[in-house]
Image (tube, grey):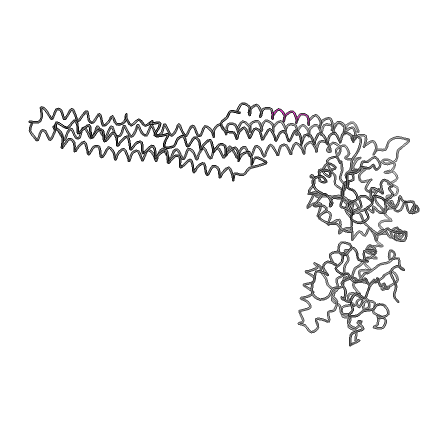
């Protein structure tokens, strides 16, 4: 006989649902489990090759009157939560998921969704007869594939052939069904034993705690003879701590502002004193730091002062921020706690709470934030962060219909939460009419199924640890809808039971207990931690600047070393080149002198010939030295053009920190332009125009040689011309040797003088260039020293904050003893 669902109260029975996609044999499996004949099966349900025949629930008693077997409509590819099974999901104790064929995503989708709601799922691969004509291991391979695909340990193999009226052979084949039926029976018996054990334990605990609860309620919740409760006294103590914390943090905020303003003034003074510096990057650096400090003063510290001003208006409040995704039930909780009429509760998926709202709950201030999954940019994020900053405790609401990692990931993107963090798991059982309410009140354990909810708890702990880096989290199961309905006039007869089962009192008790034990610490942290977060942010900004400056100092030092290498190489190359050229000129000059002595000594035209030799040598020497220094100028200029090119590349690709990129790129560009002007001034033309090598002074060698030869010529042209030829030749040879030795000494002296001139001139140019780098480094060191001083003073404020917080808490503890 067919029984429809609306005639049965499932809250009082053990219920097994057979679920799956269309045409998997769900109805056939149900008939086989019930051990019906083929004719009886046709009376219970229609089965066949036409899919989607089961359009509503079909329910039959199974084993005994307290167990129901339910055949459900097929699940298509539609949104799972729209399926009819959702209406009774909380009353289902065991799910049999029927699959067939080879692994496909449709089956996996159903299994994953079921796992969210139910931890007890038997997976049945129906139609094992399809593999009868295959290799013997093929079905085992298929089962293994399914087990890996669904990540389950066991899959039942069944055959339900014979229950399909279109089959040619009416013979019934129900292999595997008996094993499945036996395991279902064992599961039911185990659950019944567990239930009986729990009932006995709860009775024992209830008897033991009833007497203790009286004393706890009297001491911490109920006023004695008009005196305030301990909880109210704890809140008064929290208010005193808040007042002291506010005054201390306001003082440190002003001190921070003074320190940074003084630093800004010092930078401005340095900037003014160096305003005529020929390189502009240092001035730009000073301007940038000044702007950065302005931003800290006008933005960061201003935000701190605004935050303190808001907290000042709530010095008497212990504040709790409530976060959660859209449709989790935040509005329902607000309606429950404020005796609302339900008008603000969302009707679907819309974002009901669009702005931060506040309401009071038994001496507590609740800050209700917009749905965290519906944030629409920086404005919503800023609102959320401000709520965290104002709060002494954070509650995060999720629901058992869809615990998603994304909601915790979104929460993790907000400010790091250094406050007590409690997760409320809203169990969303159907409570739409009086019948459903009665079922809920009769069997609340069905809704608060510990085994099912424990799976959600494990997921929540994992997500909280992963995205919020909180190792241990308190999770409280609540029923927001029950709390709301307890205030509605039409359900007044269930008021007390509904409120108790909402478990919102448990939330309040945990909060009150935390206030009683840790309230002073929480209130102080709300003020002190906010200031410390700001200080750490300022310190990070200054750290970035300091590291940036260190990088730039290292950059300048590396370029200085590169410039020194350029000049060192140029000086050595020039000296070697001078040696070769001068020696070659003197070698030819000595040859000409020797030929002159041999050919013209004693000739009356000797002096005229010698002057010609001297003039030609002087001209060659002057021209060669001029060419040499033109060459050195060109070489040096070429090297610095390449240096300039590399310099520009380095300034484009050097790693910059914070927001220095634009400033330094522009500053280095200006510096390179200045270098370019300087290098153009030391080019070949400048070397020639300066004439600093003084060739006229160096060609005196030729004059000295000429003078010596003239004297000899005069002697030989007179008194010696009738002497013996042998003696004449000897004197002539001696004259040659003496002249060659003197010319060699003059050559050495000349090369030495030119070396000195090269080294002196290049060193002067090198020093002129390096002075720019040195001055830049000195200015950077000056900024860095200022930063180090500021950082030490700010660190001192941070340490004093810690000390002052400890002292006011110690004083409060002594007062309350």
Task: Give, as a single range, the part of the protein colored magenta.
Answer: 252-264
Residue 137, compared with residue 649, is above or below; it is below
Residue 416 place in picture, x, y as percent: 69, 39
Task: Name the residue rendered at 82%, 48% in the picture.
Answer: 347
Is 532 placed left or right of 96 in the picture?
Answer: left
Foreground of the two, 353 or 39: 353
Task: Name the residue rendered at 71%, 40% in the picture.
Answer: 381
Residue 746, compared with residue 77, is above or below; it is above
Quarter occupied by residue 418? top right
Residue 453, compared with residue 279, is above or below; it is below
Is 444 placed left or right of 594 in the picture?
Answer: right
Task: Name the residue rendered at 43%, 35% in the picture.
Answer: 562
Residue, far bottom: 169
Quarter occupied by residue 263? top right
Residue 79 place in picture, x, y as percent: 76, 56
> In the picture, which quadrant includes the C terminus?
top right
Residue 250 place in picture, x, y as percent: 71, 27
Q: How many labels sit on residues? A: 0
Residue 249 place in picture, x, y as percent: 71, 28
Foreground of the two, 623 or 782: 623
């Amino acid at each position: 006989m067919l029984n429809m669902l609306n005639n049965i109260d499932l809250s009082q029975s053990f219920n097994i649902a057979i679920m799956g996609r269309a045409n998997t044999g769900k109805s056939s499996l149900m008939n086989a489990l019930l051990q019906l004949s083929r004719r009886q099966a046709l009376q219970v349900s229609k089965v066949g090759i036409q899919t989607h025949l089961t359009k509503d629930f079909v329910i039959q008693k199974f084993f005994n009157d307290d167990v129901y077997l339910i055949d459900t409509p097929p699940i298509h590819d539609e949104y799972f939560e729209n399926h009819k099974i959702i209406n009774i999901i909380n009353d289902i104790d065991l799910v049999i998921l029927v699959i067939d064929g080879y692994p496909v995503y449709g089956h996996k989708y159903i299994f994953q969704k079921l796992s969210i709601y139910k931890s007890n799922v038997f997976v049945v691969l129906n139609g094992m007869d399809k593999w009868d004509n295959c290799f013997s291991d093929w079905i085992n391979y298929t089962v293994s594939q399914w087990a890996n695909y669904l990540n389950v340990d066991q899959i039942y193999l069944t055959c339900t052939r014979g229950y399909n009226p279109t089959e040619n052979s009416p013979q019934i084949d129900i292999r595997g069904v008996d094993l499945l039926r036996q395991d279902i029976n064992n599961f039911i018996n185990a659950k019944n034993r567990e239930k009986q054990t729990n009932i006995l334990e709860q009775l024992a605990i209830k008897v033991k705690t009833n007497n203790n609860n009286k004393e706890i309620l009297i001491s911490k919740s109920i006023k004695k003879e008009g005196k305030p409760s301990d909880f109210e006294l704890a809140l008064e103590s929290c208010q005193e701590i808040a007042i002291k914390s506010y005054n201390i943090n306001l003082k440190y905020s002003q001190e921070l502002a003074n320190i940074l303003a003084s630093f800004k003034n010092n930078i401005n003074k340095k900037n003014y004193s160096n305003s005529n510096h020929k390189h502009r990057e240092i001035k730009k650096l000073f301007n940038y730091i000044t702007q950065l400090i302005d931003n800290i003063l006008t933005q960061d510290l201003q935000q701190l002062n605004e935050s303190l001003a808001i907290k000042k208006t709530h010095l008497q409040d212990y504040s709790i921020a409530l976060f959660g995704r859209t449709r989790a039930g935040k509005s329902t909780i607000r309606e429950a706690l404020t005796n609302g009429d339900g008008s603000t509760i969302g009707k679907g998926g819309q974002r009901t709470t669009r702005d931060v709202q506040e309401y009071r709950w038994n001496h507590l201030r609740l800050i209700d934030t917009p749905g965290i999954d519906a944030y629409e940019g920086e404005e919503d994020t800023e609102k959320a962060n401000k709520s965290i900053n104002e709060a002494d405790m954070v509650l995060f609401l999720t629901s058992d219909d869809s615990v998603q990692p994304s909601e915790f990931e979104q929460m993790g993107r907000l400010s790091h939460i250094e406050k007590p963090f409690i997760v409320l798991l809203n169990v969303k059982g159907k409570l739409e009419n009086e019948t459903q309410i009665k079922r809920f009140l009769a069997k609340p354990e069905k809704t608060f199924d510990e085994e099912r909810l424990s799976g959600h708890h494990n997921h929540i702990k994992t997500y909280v640890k992963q995205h919020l880096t909180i190792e241990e989290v308190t999770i409280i199961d609540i029923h927001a809808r029950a709390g709301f309905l307890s205030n509605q006039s039409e359900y007044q007869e269930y008021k007390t039971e509904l409120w108790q089962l909402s478990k919102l009192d448990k939330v309040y008790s945990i909060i009150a207990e935390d206030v009683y034990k840790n309230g002073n610490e929480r209130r102080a942290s709300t003020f002190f931690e906010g200031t410390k977060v700001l200080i750490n942010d300022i310190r990070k900004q200054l750290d970035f600047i300091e590291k940036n400056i260190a990088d730039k100092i290292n950059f300048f030092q590396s370029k200085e070393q590169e410039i020194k290498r350029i000049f060192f190489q140029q000086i050595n190359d020039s000296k070697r080149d001078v040696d070769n050229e001068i020696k070659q000129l003197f070698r030819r000059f000595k040859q000409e002198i020797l030929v002159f002595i041999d050919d013209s000594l004693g000739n009356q035209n000797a002096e005229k010939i010698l002057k010609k030799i001297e003039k030609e040598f002087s001209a060659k020497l002057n021209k060669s030295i001029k060419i040499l220094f033109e060459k050195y100028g060109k070489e040096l200029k070429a090297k610095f053009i390449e240096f300039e090119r590399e310099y520009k590349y380095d300034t484009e690709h050097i790693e910059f920190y914070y927001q220095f990129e634009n400033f330094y790129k522009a500053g280095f560009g200006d510096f390179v332009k200045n270098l370019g002007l300087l290098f153009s001034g030391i080019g070949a033309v400048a070397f020639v125009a300066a004439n600093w090598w003084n060739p006229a002074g160096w060609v005196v060698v030729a004059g000295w040689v000429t003078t010596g030869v003239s004297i000899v010529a005069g002697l030989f042209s007179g008194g010696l011309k009738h002497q013996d030829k042998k003696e004449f030749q000897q004197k002539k040879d001696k004259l040659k040797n003496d002249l060659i030795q003197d010319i060699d000494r003059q050559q050495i002296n000349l090369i030495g003088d030119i070396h000195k001139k090269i080294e002196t001139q290049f060193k002067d140019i090198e020093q002129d260039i390096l002075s720019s780098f040195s001055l830049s480094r000195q200015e950077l060191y000056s900024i860095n020293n200022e930063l180090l001083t500021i950082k030490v003073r700010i660190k001192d404020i941070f340490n004093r904050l810690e000390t002052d917080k400890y002292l006011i808490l110690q004083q409060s503890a002594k007062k309350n003893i």
